[in-house]
Amino acid sequence: MTSDAFPVTFRDLAPQTQQLLAASGQRVADSLGSLATMLRCLGARSVLLVVDETAARAAGAETLLRQGFSTVDCLTFNRFSPNPKLTDATAAVEAARQSGADAVVAVGGGSCIDVAKLAALGARLPAEVGLLQAGDCPTDVRPLPLIACPTTSGSGSEATHFAVAYAEGRKRSIAHPGVRPSNVILDARLVQAMPARLAATSGLDALSQSLEAMWAAGSTPASDAYASEAARLIVGAIEPSVREGRPDARRAMMLGAHLAGQAINLSKTTAAHAMSYPLTSLHGVPHGHAVALFLGWVGAANGALDEADCQHPLGAEHVRRAVAAAAAQLGSSVERFPLAVADLLKRLGLASSLQEAGVPAHGLATLLDLIDPVRLGNNPRRLSRERLGEILELAHRGAAG
């Protein structure tokens, strides 16, 4: 790397937000105008651009991107699906290798950034090592440097050290410390053009991440700080972001989603995420909406744990306090947590139950069979198959006021 000064130009942030951004270990800027400087700092000469061209065009980002790439060779990769398949990521790896890229830039939502992460990692793996084995590689394998520019406020992928791809209909998470982007651009212009429905579903993903991080078995004091500030920003901004598209609310959502990503980078997610993946893959419910359909029910179940089924290292009382704090972010008690989430879904114009989302009752058994066991291991309460079945039935019926 060169010694160029790095611009961090966020203004008008609450002190706690500014402090959390500064402590993240990533270089974070608030304008695509910083892209050329970032590439220069990385010493990049050839770049693979992984881009959601529809989102970039809607945001009017083409001119800024051309300026940012004016001194480097750039190959564009745009062949990936909204829930990226492993084959999409493999194609991106080949593009990175064939172009001789020495850096990767992602401009898009969580799927785009995940594909870029896997391209950056796969380009540096031995040819005989597949992406699904990448998480077992030595941590001294150094992926290509990555600059992430999110165009949605939801996944927080720009803040995490893992990436998601679907293989044979199942969600696979590949974790490696080197895939966490070294540089992030949170330019609020990139999220201003989001359609209302995308703003809602991606915002619910960020909200769910922040609240799950508060009670996760893997939570730490640092993840708690990120999660609490993320939830504060998101709860205050999600409705005006969706209903009015207000620029200040879109900016707050972008920051909140990024901080939620920082939280789950440390804590990981829990049962609400574990239960959501088959709902997305089998029934097409957008990921953030799918998580939210389980969030309140999982929270209420976690708040009713005892020491016998607690798997949080700090014990059942700590979990009950954490769940109460999460529910309080929505102005709710633990007991009314499912209703609070359902009410929010209705205000955002989304289905508030699995039944309303088009899931037939006879499909619940299949959803139960496909729940992700890895995320269940990070849930603070040990959930039996019977308990998971009960949560599915409650989520199917929905909460009544």
Image: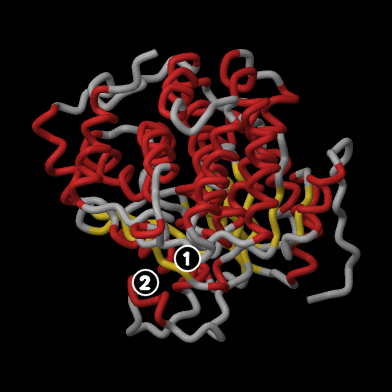
Place of residue 387 in the rendered image (x, y in percent of width and height, measured from the top left): 24, 45
Q: Amino acid at mark 2?
A: Leu
Q: CA distance from mark 1 to mark 2?
A: 9 Å
Q: Nearer the viewer, residue 322 or 107?
A: 322
Query: Mark 2 — residue?
Result: 131
- In the picture, measured across the screen, residue 195 lies left or right of residue 372, that is right
* Residue ID for mark 1: 119
Which residue is rendered at x = 70% and y = 69% of the image? 44
- Report whether residue 72 is seen: yes
Could you say whether the residue bearing mark 1 is in a helix, strand or loop?
helix
Identify the mark at residue 59; answer none if there is no mark: none
Q: Is residue 152 above or below residue 156?
A: above
- Say what amino acid the circle numbered 1 marks: Ala
**Residue 210 against residue 357 in the figure, above or below:** below
Q: Residue at x 86, y 61 (%)?
A: 6
In this rendered view, identify the residue nearer to me: 341 or 30: 341
